[in-house]
Amino acid sequence: MISKAPLAGAELRAELDRLAHAVLPGGRRALDRLLPVFAGLAGGAAAVYLEEEHALRREATIGDASFPEELDSPPLHALGFDGGWLVWSPPRPAEELPGEAIAVALAVAAAAREVQLAHRLRLQDFETKSRVVQLEALYDVGLAIASTLDFDRLCEEVLMRAVSLLDARRGALYLGDRRELRLDRSFGGDAEPRLDPESREVASLLAGEARANCCALPGAQYLFGVPIVLEGEPKGVLVVGDKENRKGVGPFRPEDRRTLELLANQAAIALENAELHRQALEKERLEREVELASQIQRQILPKGVPAIAGYELAGWYRPAQHIGGDYYDFFALPGEARTALVVGDVSGKGVPAALLVSTLHSALRLLAERQGISPALFARLNRHVLDSSSPNKFITLFFAELDAASGRLAYVNAGHNPAVLARADGRVEQLGAGGPPIGLIADASFRTRRVELAPGDLVCLYSDGITEACSPADEEYDIERLSALLAAERTRPLAEIVAAVDREVTRFAAGRPQADDQTVVLLRRRPD
């Protein structure tokens, strides 16, 4: 503000005469000399307003009149010049001002223009230096975000750097793809949990600056966002809101968008590297899990075949993947010449299935040694599996007990595939179900059945990976084909019968990948 009082009378005339013959300094000093002269000619008070950040802000005043700090629009009685306005009080039309006032007003405008240019030069110098600092900060940001492969930490770093670089009060990071953007984290206030990439609001947010009540940051007055893109594919959106300034918050500058775009480019590469690292760690974890499950399964499966006088026994297993859910076992039971044969199929794959197989293996051996094959054994086993596994886990199980002396085979089929009994004379029988799968129904009941094995009779226990193997035409191998094969091959060595089953099922699939685990257990009473 100019403290010198407006000039009047002889003092005004003397000043006008001096101005007419003097070469005035430019800029601020000229404005300080000229504005009191104009005020004296115009009526007592005057002010100069200059355009600054889309507003008219008061630059200089003189006199007792109250001029506001800012003008929304020029007053009715004012003189405009390139970049500002000259106003006076008391207000009257410019046509009524003395000619000398108009002449001085032109000089005031020229001086004010120089002041404004000086302001702009200082501002440009400040912005240039700020830009250098910002670019240096971007370089530091690049180093910072490239130095971590922790995905969560990286996301936090990207958002906080964006808010800091642009002096924003609020921010949000969304990750996703063309279908959906999900909020990863926010700063300074609430953010919408999801955005539709195809919506008009998001398009407006990415195209330019969005105003208040935008979808991303509700309540923000000013905000804009930039996409995070890698190799042409969207990875997310980085949003900032409400740029801080000396009056509170205001709009972002055009160069802020470029800064945020550069940060988003760096973030895209860093996030991709972090995601690849996370996937590599997850793959490594899964591989360790699969190896652990495979070890569990290898420990559970029989190491050899027990010798049973008067009988032949063979077991074969091939998982569809590195680890499967099939299970088979043979073990001796208390008493003379009693042997248990088991084939089961656990729902699911991986470590959960392997652990359930381990539970089944331990419980079945313990209960069978105490109770032998019986409905009570299966009822207890059913309760044990229900109590020790998740609700969606169950086991189909075929459990048989061979009394080698009598040739009697007692069995319980708990929802498993029917075993095939190929008689020595070529007839084929099926040993069907006697109850539901284990772990499926809380109050399930089970029934024990018995068959007599004559010399030359062959029993085949198997899993559904055999009978449900599909041809290219989606036709299943089915139990009829298996029964015909066993009847035809029943007299051959058991190892050759197993090889024949493998060969025929593989030939039937005609190159289709194995979809499920395949297990075969063969028991044959030797001919007399």
Image (tube, rainbow, N blue to C red):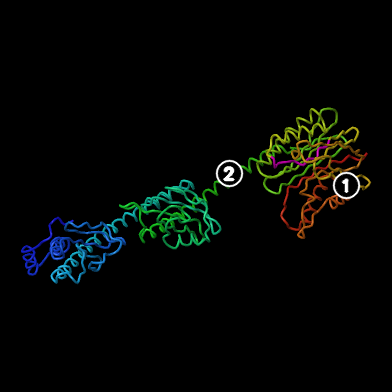
Q: What amino acid is found at the position of numbered circle 1 in the picture?
A: Arg
Q: Is residue 59 magenta?
A: no
Where is residue 5 shown, x and y percent of the image? 12, 57
Vertical relation: 527 (above or below) 137:
above
Hey, what amino acid is under mark 2?
A: Arg
Q: Which residue occupies 56% across, 46% down?
A: 282
Reading the image, the residue beneath label 1 is: 490
Density class for disc 1 (Cα within 10 Å; few <14, some 14-19, many ≥20) is: many
Q: Residues within 10 Å of mark 2 (few under 14, many from 20)?
A: few
> In the image, 519: left or right of 25?
right
Q: Which residues are magenta?
A: 391-400
Q: Is residue 347 left or right of residue 20?
A: right
On residue 210, the disc is none
Magenta stretch secondary structure, dominant: strand
The one of 331 and 167 positioned closer to us in this rendering: 167
Question: Is 311 located above or below residue 88 in the figure?
Answer: above
Q: Locate the N terminus by quadrant.
A: bottom left
Determine the secondary structure under disc 2. Answer: helix
Quadrant of the rendered image containing residue 327? top right
